[in-house]
Amino acid sequence: MKHGWMALVGLCLGSMAAVTIGCDGDSKLTVVTEEGAAAPHVNLPTVPTLPAPPPINHTDGSFTVYGLRHNATRDNNLWSKQQRVHGFIVSVYTARNPRGLPCTEADRCVEERPHIYISDNRTERDPAKMMMVTGYATFQHEIEAARSAARSGRQPTAAQLAQIAAGLVKPVPTDFDEGAEVVVAGNFTRRAANGQADSNGLLEYTSHTTTTPAPPPANAPRR
């Protein structure tokens, strides 16, 4: 009995530190709030401000890269149809020979099909935000020949113009340079006829308009 009484007294005295358990069975929680300089502070990192995504469409009605892919996740009718996408050329694939020069027909290079990447940001380096454009040429030497003809001022022959007008061939672009701003029309698909593929969607080239040419290279000679 003595030990039981002492235990009860010790329980009542010990409870006075924070939680008071009275001898009559009531429970009380004593909370001490510190304020001012002595109060504890939690240093949480600031919430990062994420940039807003690009708009869905440009003012000319063409899609942004983000806009077409964003809408295509919700509308399957956009796939395998002609679409117009407005963006900047951020990367150009150029097949090169062992000398580091663009491949000619005589080089017989082992190369990918020509393609470029466009994006909504001129300085974009995130591949996930780029869209491939392909199908405008079969080999690098076709592009080089077209550029050479453009520099020399040679015009397509009557037969070539007739093939272009009939849709049998497409003019090879000569101004697909990194930094150019373009509006590209093409078939929006996951796999082009030439074998190039992207599960997020690419454009199989039909035509294009260059709204702003690429800036001249930094080492270009002054005229």
Image (cartoon, rainbow, N blue to C red):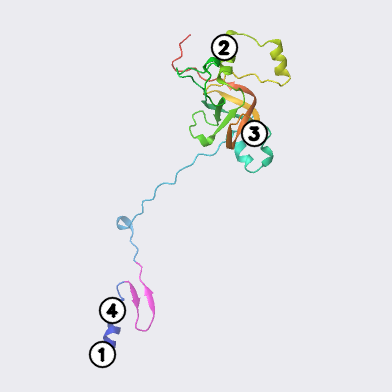
Which SS class for mark 2? helix
Q: Nearer the viewer, residue 140 or 200?
A: 140
Q: Residue at x 51, y 34 (%)?
A: 127
Among the two numbered marks 1 and 3 on one chain, the one whose residue lies closer to the N terminus: 1
93 sits left or right of 208 in the view: left
**29 magenta-colored:** yes
Above/below status of 56 relative to 37: above
Q: Position of residue 100 (x, y in %)?
A: 45, 18
Q: Which residue is tagged 4?
A: 13
Q: Residue at x 63, y 23 (%)?
A: 208
Q: Quadrant of residue 218?
A: top left
Q: Which residue is tagged 1?
A: 2
Among the two numbered marks 2 and 4 on one chain, the one whose residue lies closer to the N terminus: 4
Q: Position of residue 80 (x, y in %)?
A: 67, 35
Pointer 2 local density, CA inside 10 Å: few below 14, some 14–19, many at least 20: few
Q: Which residue is tagged 2?
A: 148
Q: Nearer the viewer, residue 19 or 108?
A: 108
Report the amino acid beneath label 2: Ser
Q: Position of residue 191 (x, y in %)?
A: 62, 34
Q: Which residue is tagged 3?
A: 188
